[in-house]
């Protein structure tokens, strides 16, 4: 068993281009399969409430065809819990979602949502789905994830990706400290948002 970092590839914006063209291509499922052929360890897709990129049928096809785990990003709503329970991906990552945002802008407030979020985690776990929470690299949020019963967290790396110089280094240290705390308190730790070939190295 190796401890090498695992790479999950997000195919949302392949679907964005497809939908902008109003045709059936480029196909996010084909893109996902190409990523797998190139060595991706998993595929992530976000089914937003407004279906602005990934669509329901994309999630079904991804689940049917992928040779690697599917990570289903979604808002913590009854509708999405029902869809996830029907599709049964390997994992679900619960994320905050606002219709006016272009992309996810920050982490879920696990500490503030409390029982409402906990009931979603329980429902997904009962369906045999591994649940992660997309949160800020903040000790309060990490401890809330443990209290709510989430086995996995994904640390928001968006600010790290947007910063430069000393400010970026400070944010990187914040992420590393959060990752160390996650391990200490028994959480599996992932990281994501805005990461590219050029900036993922220090985070990995």
Image (cartoon, rainbow, N blue to C red):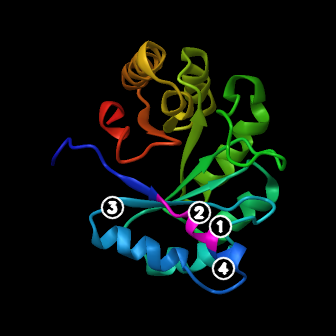
First of labels 3, 2 by sequence position: 2
- Please state, as top left, top right, bottom left or bottom right, where the C terminus lies in the image: top left
Please give the label number shown on residue 57.
Answer: 4
Above or below for 116 versus 109: below
Query: In the image, 54: left or right of 161?
Result: right
State yes or no: discs 4 and 2 in contact (Cβ < 8 Å).
no
Residue indicated by mark 1: 16
Q: Are marks 2 and 1 in contact (CB under 8 Å)?
A: yes
Of the two numbered discs 4 and 2 in the rendering, the one whose residue sits closer to the viewer: 2
Question: Residue 40 bears which disc, if any?
Answer: 3
Magenta range is: 10-17
How far from the left and from the top, in percent, is residue 1?
15, 48
Q: Secondary structure at mark 1?
A: helix
Q: Earlier in the sequence, mark 3 or mark 1?
A: 1
Q: Quadrant of residue 101?
A: top right
- The quadrant where residue 201 appears: top left
27, 162: nearer the viewer: 162
Which mark is first along the chain, 3 or 4? 3
């Amino acid at each position: 068993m190796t401890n090498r970092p695992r790479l999950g590839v997000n195919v949302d914006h392949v679907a964005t281009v497809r939908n902008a063209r109003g045709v059936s291509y480029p196909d996010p499922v084909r893109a996902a399969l190409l990523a797998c052929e190139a060595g991706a360890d998993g595929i992530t897709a976000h089914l937003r409430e407004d279906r602005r990129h990934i669509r329901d049928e994309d999630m079904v096809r991804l689940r049917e065809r992928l040779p690697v785990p599917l990570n289903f990003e979604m808002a913590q709503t009854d509708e999405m819990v029902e869809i996830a329970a029907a599709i049964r991906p390997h994992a679900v990552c619960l994320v905050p979602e606002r219709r006016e945002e272009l992309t996810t802008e920050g982490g879920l407030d696990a500490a503030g949502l409390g029982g409402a979020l906990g009931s979603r985690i329980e429902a997904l776990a009962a369906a045999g789905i591994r649940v992660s929470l997309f949160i800020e690299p903040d000790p309060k949020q990490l401890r809330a994830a443990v209290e709510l019963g989430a086995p996995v967290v994904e640390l928001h790396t968006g600010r790290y990706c947007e910063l430069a110089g000393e400010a970026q280094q400070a944010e990187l240290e914040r992420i590393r400290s959060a990752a160390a705390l996650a391990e200490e308190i028994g959480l599996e730790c992932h990281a994501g948002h805005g990461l590219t070939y050029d900036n993922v190295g220090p985070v990995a």
